[in-house]
């Protein structure tokens, strides 16, 4: 049994459609989904704005690496093409595994480059922490403390101010 926090991002094509497709592909393991934010590109400014969201997922049968496999399946479903020249470049779909917790709620720690846990850049990314905080306000990022404190700190203030909630969009169908 593991639970995970997954970050979803898209800045090419039907961005909202890609995020909604991600939720569909992840299926019944999605426990909670955040609202959608419009966010300026991080790490490589010369690309369109992203839509970002976060989902909390759980599965009695999933090991930590299964979440990476599922993340890749979601990216493949959105026909993501990797550009080796642009590490943080544009993409139809990006799914990052932010944290994984075991059945007792303990965080899984990993230095494996294939699956580093927690995600090594999550603490720098308002586009991850803000939607995550909306759906799990008391969450902690192992090694960095409460996400509420990270969001209140000076390092993320400018990025946070540049995020725009998109209440006109939703991850899950309300029909
Ligand atoms: N926690 C993690 N979540 C997702 N991918 C990870 C993680 N830890 C390591 N990786 C590895 O990172 C590699 C690059 O993934 P990807 O192309 O999605 O990176 P990126 O989205 O460009 O950058 P970033 O990981 O900073 O968001 C993948 O091969 C994957 O195995
Ligand atoms: N705003 C924003 N910027 C990014 C994102 C993302 O999801 N949102 N993903 C990236 C891939 O590493 C690089 N930059």
Image: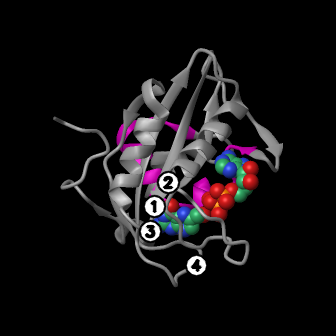
Cα separation, mark 1 vs mark 3, equals: 6 Å
Q: Is residue 100 left or right of residue 173?
A: right
Badge 3 marks a residue whose secondary structure is: loop
Disc 4 under 8 Å from ligand 2? The reply is: yes
Q: Which residues are magenta?
A: 116-140
Cα separation, mark 4 vs mark 2, equals: 21 Å
Please name the colour scheme applied to the rendered image.
one colour
Q: Which residue is mark 2?
A: 78
Cα separation, mark 1 vs mark 4, equals: 14 Å
Q: Which residue is mark 1?
A: 10
Quadrant of the image containing the C terminus: top left
Point out the tag, 2 or 1, that comes first from the N-terminus. 1
Pointer 1 and pointer 3: residues touching (CB < 8 Å)? yes
Mark 4 Cα within 10 Å, few/some/many (few <14, many 20+)? Answer: few
Which is in the foreground here, disc 1 or disc 3? 3
Tell me how many marks there are: 4
Cα separation, mark 2 vs mark 1, equals: 10 Å
Q: Which residue is mark 4?
A: 44
Instruction: Decide whether residue 153 is among the magenta residues.
Output: no
Pointer 4 and pointer 3: residues touching (CB < 8 Å)? no
The part of the image, by quadrant, that contains residue 1 is top right
Is 106 located above or below residue 55 in the figure?
above
Which is in the foreground here, disc 4 or disc 3? 3
Residue that lies at the very extreme toward the bottom in this rendered image: 46
Disc 1 under 8 Å from ligand 2? The reply is: yes
Q: Which residue is mark 3?
A: 12
Residue located 49% across and 62% down the image = 92
Q: Give the percent coordinates (x, y) of residue 134.
A: 35, 43
Instruction: Decide whether residue 132 is among the magenta residues.
Output: yes
């Amino acid at each position: 049994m593991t639970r995970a926090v997954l970050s979803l991002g898209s800045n090419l094509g039907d961005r909202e459609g890609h995020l909604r497709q991600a939720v569909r592909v992840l299926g019944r393991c999605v426990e909670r989904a955040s609202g959608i934010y419009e966010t300026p590109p991080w790490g490589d400014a010369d690309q369109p704005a992203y839509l970002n969201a976060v989902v909390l997922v759980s599965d009695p049968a999933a090991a930590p690496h299964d979440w990476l496999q599922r993340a890749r399946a979601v990216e493949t479903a959105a026909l993501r093409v990797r550009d080796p020249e642009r590490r943080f470049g544009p993409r139809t779909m990006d799914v990052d595994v932010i944290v994984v917790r075991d059945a007792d709620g303990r965080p899984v720690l990993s230095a494996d480059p294939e699956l580093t846990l927690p995600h090594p850049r999550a603490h720098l990314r308002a586009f991850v922490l803000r939607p995550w905080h909306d759906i799990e306000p008391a969450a902690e990022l192992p090694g960095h403390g409460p996400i509420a404190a990270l969001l209140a700190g000076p390092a993320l203030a400018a990025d946070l101010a540049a995020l725009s909630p998109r209440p006109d969009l939703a991850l899950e169908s309300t029909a």
